[in-house]
Image: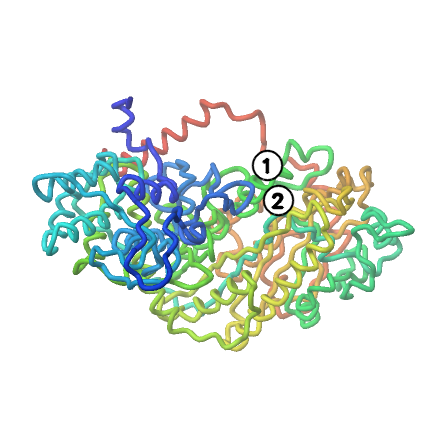
């Protein structure tokens, strides 16, 4: 049974999960295995099950192929385009509606309809080893095909039957007529059926549970070019997913008068027979701290990260010690009250690190998206790219900046390489044209993303395919493939007419609850080779001075190991940034000198979980300034809504991170006094009691009302 009021509520419903769309097509159109029996040679196997080859890599979802313990999408995800964004309505399934997934899903469904289940033109399966890819209704190169024959006296009745099965009757009359007219010139009924099936599976009604009300207006996908003549710059956000054990990346080395290295080895489990999970000095690459505020004159970089030492020694890389997600400076006495986040939880801290807005002043946005918003409004042309997945980091406010473009590390496949009818792509655009304000939100989200994806895909594919990579990147290395794709996209900057690019890539397997040493040896070797090739290619392209890489992870890990020679979820840790324009060679922040609970400074929790002394804003402020965000005023307040809660001494400016003057030094006395004063201040977020359900839904309803009023409803 259905409730009529819900079917007319534009905010009710959802985007359908990708694998359910494929399953719907297979079941409703009566897929059956059908192996040819007239092929010369030995008899062929005829009892194949449905063989969807690497389907998760093609459409973003597949049976038993979860990308992480949090499944395929996050429950709090708000799409970065469409009516859900201004209304702040979540749509978890929209997280996988990315440009490569959209293109691959439609290519795969078109292939299934035209050629049967095979690899023809980016189909969902493999090459069966016989036949050719022909759109003739014979399915000569397939494991099976769709057998449904729609009943009806004319094309309209047949199309209505297909729409009933594929969209549960949601397909609008206007879209139905468009499809029938577009396919009317096909020579035979089988061809007409295949044509109509293909067009139906592109519609918002198929991809969501919403009805659609058309406005009669075309969608405008042309990007507005900025007026700025600023030279090109790029930020590369490198996320180490899972919680990096950064005390293995950067360890104490030479420390006096307190022997911090010995304290480090002790808490890391050193005994008479084992080093525990601590690193002996023979496995560390020594670097000078170049900062008398640190408790050590020298630190050690993990032996598998020689690139970081080389860049540090060349003055092109900075570390920031004991950094993490903070709303304001805290100690053991008040951190639970003053830090409104689910500390130590992967899903929460992963998102909060990318958002950097614990008070939800700009709900649903990320720090990269807000930077893009500010610069777009200032007249710059900005693009945002995520390699292999959609992320909140690059989400901005509605209509303020660019929507993120998701690109596969393997490049861009051709869309609809063998269209069944002339002008098929234009028909698809017509089927997904503009809608009214009371049309279904989720269908609108699909249609807006589809139109945007196809427009950007067409431009980007042509330009990316023409690029040449001059550096040999490591093979069998996913993160190297991602870095390589960034260098190819950078080469298209002139064709795209941009001043600024923001890129997101990640590497996984840092949730090291067991065998942390062995895992980090492999992980660090993998990313060191990838980053080295990336730096080499940037230098070849003349973009080294124009690019900065910033590295983050959701949290650090316990200094004290567990019984499985691993480390567990913690908080404060160390991260780095590098680039050709960096004023590097410094360990900024404040490396802890005591890791045991009950320490004098009140920063150590149980098992060596350290409270951060520098916020993520510490690095972000100088990077944002270098990128073009004014250092003070409403622009920086939008980019970093919490930065005014911290003393200036721990917010590094453009001059600190990129200046060409003398080496920056943090005065220990000033830093400590400012930090202690901030701990006692009442600046920042007053967390107060938990928000009630009523207070949550009131602004939600207000947001929906604002959106509807803006459309004149």
Q: Identify the residue under disc 2.
A: 325
Q: Position of residue 276 (x, y in %)?
A: 82, 50
Q: Position of residue 436 (x, y in %)?
A: 22, 39
Residue most extreme to the front: 42
- Residue 169 located left or right of residue 584: left
Contact between marks 1 and 2 (CB within 8 A): the answer is yes
Query: Badge 1: how crowded within 10 Å, few (<14), some, or many (20+)?
Result: some
Q: Secondary structure at mark 1?
A: loop
- Which quadrant of the rendered structure holds the N terminus? top left
Please identify the quarter of the rendering in which residue 697 is found.
top left
Q: Is residue 376 visible?
A: yes
Vertical order, 708 against 529 (above or below): above
Q: Position of residue 679 (x, y in %)?
A: 70, 39
Seen at 58% across and 31% down, the residue is 687
Looking at the picture, tell me which residue is in the foreground, 95 or 309: 95
Q: Identify the residue under disc 1.
A: 341
Seen at 41% across and 73% down, the residue is 467
Please identify the quarter of the rendering in which residue 17 is found.
top left
Vertical order, 414 against 643 (above or below): below
Q: Secondary structure at mark 2?
A: loop
- Which quadrant of the rendered structure holds the C terminus? top left
Mark 1 / mark 2, whichever is N-terminal: 2
């Amino acid at each position: 049974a259905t409730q009529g009021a819900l079917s007319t509520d534009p905010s009710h419903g959802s985007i359908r999960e990708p694998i359910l769309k494929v399953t719907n097509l297979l079941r409703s159109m009566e897929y059956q295995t059908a192996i040819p029996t007239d092929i010369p040679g030995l008899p062929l196997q005829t009892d194949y099950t449905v063989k969807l080859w690497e389907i998760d890599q093609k459409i973003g979802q597949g049976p038993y192929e979860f990308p992480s313990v949090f499944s395929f999408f996050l429950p709090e995800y708000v799409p970065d385009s469409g009516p859900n964004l201004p209304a702040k309505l979540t749509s978890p399934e929209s997280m996988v509606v990315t440009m490569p997934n959209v293109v691959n899903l439609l290519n795969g469904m078109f292939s299934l309809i035209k050629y049967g289940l095979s690899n023809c033109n980016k189909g969902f399966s493999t090459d069966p080893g016989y036949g050719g890819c022909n759109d003739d209704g014979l399915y000569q190169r397939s494991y099976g095909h769709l057998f449904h024959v729609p009943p009806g006296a004319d094309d309209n009745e047949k199309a209505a039957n297909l729409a009933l099965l594929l969209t549960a009757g949601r397909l609008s009359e206007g879209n139905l007529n468009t499809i029938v007219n577009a396919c009317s010139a096909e020579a035979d009924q089988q061809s007409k059926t295949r044509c109509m099936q293909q067009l139906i599976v592109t519609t918002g009604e198929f991809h969501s549970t919403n009805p659609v009300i058309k406005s009669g207006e075309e969608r405008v996908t042309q990007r507005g070019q900025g007026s700025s003549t600023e030279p090109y710059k790029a930020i590369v956000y490198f996320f180490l997913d899972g919680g990096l054990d950064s005390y293995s990346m950067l360890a104490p080395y030479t420390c006096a008068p307190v022997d911090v290295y010995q304290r480090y080895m002790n808490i890391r489990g050193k005994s008479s027979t084992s080093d525990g999970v601590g690193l002996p000095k023979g496995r560390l690459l020594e670097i000078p701290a170049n900062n008398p505020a640190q408790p050590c004159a020298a630190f050690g970089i993990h032996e598998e990260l020689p690139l970081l030492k080389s860049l540090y020694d060349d003055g092109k890389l900075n570390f920031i010690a004991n950094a993490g997600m903070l709303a304001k400076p805290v100690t053991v006495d008040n951190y639970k009250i003053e830090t409104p986040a689910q500390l130590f939880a992967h899903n929460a801290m992963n998102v909060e690190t990318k958002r950097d807005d614990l008070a939800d002043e700009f709900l649903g946005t990320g720090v990269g998206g807000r930077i893009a918003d500010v610069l777009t409004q200032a007249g710059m042309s900005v693009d945002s790219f995520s390699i292999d997945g959609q992320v909140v980091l690059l989400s901005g406010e509605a209509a303020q900046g660019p929507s993120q473009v998701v690109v596969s590390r393997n490049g861009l496949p051709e869309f609809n390489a063998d269209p069944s009818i002339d002008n098929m792509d234009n028909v698809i655009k017509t089927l997904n044209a503009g809608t009214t304000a009371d049309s279904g939100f989720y269908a609108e989200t699909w249609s807006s993303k589809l139109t945007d994806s196809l427009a950007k895909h067409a431009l980007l594919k042509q330009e990316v395919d023409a690029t040449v990579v001059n550096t040999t990147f490591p093979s069998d290395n996913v993160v190297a493939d991602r870095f390589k794709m960034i260098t190819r996209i950078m080469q298209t900057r002139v064709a795209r007419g941009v001043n600024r690019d923001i890129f997101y890539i990640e590497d996984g397997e840092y949730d090291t609850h067991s065998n942390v040493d062995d895992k980090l040896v492999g992980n660090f070797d993998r990313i060191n080779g990838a980053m080295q090739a990336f730096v080499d290619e940037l230098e070849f392209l003349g973009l080294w001075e124009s690019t900065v890489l910033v590295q983050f992870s959701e949290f650090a890990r316990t200094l004290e190991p567990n019984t499985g020679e691993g480390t567990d979820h913690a908080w404060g840790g160390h991260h780095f940034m590098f680039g050709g324009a960096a004023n590097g060679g410094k360990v900024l922040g404040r490396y802890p000198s005591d890791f045991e609970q009950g320490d004098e400074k009140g920063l150590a929790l149980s098992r060596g979980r350290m409270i951060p002394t520098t916020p993520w804003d510490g690095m972000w402020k100088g990077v944002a300034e270098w990128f073009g965000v004014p250092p003070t005023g409403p622009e920086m307040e939008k980019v970093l809504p919490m930065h005014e809660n911290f003393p200036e001494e721990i917010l590094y400016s453009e001059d600190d991170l990129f200046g060409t003057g003398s080496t920056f030094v943090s005065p220990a006395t000033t830093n400590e006094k400012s930090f202690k004063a901030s701990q006692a201040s009442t600046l920042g977020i007053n967390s107060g009691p938990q928000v009630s359900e009523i207070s949550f839904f009131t602004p939600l309803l207000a947001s929906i009302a604002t959106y509807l009023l803006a459309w004149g409803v």
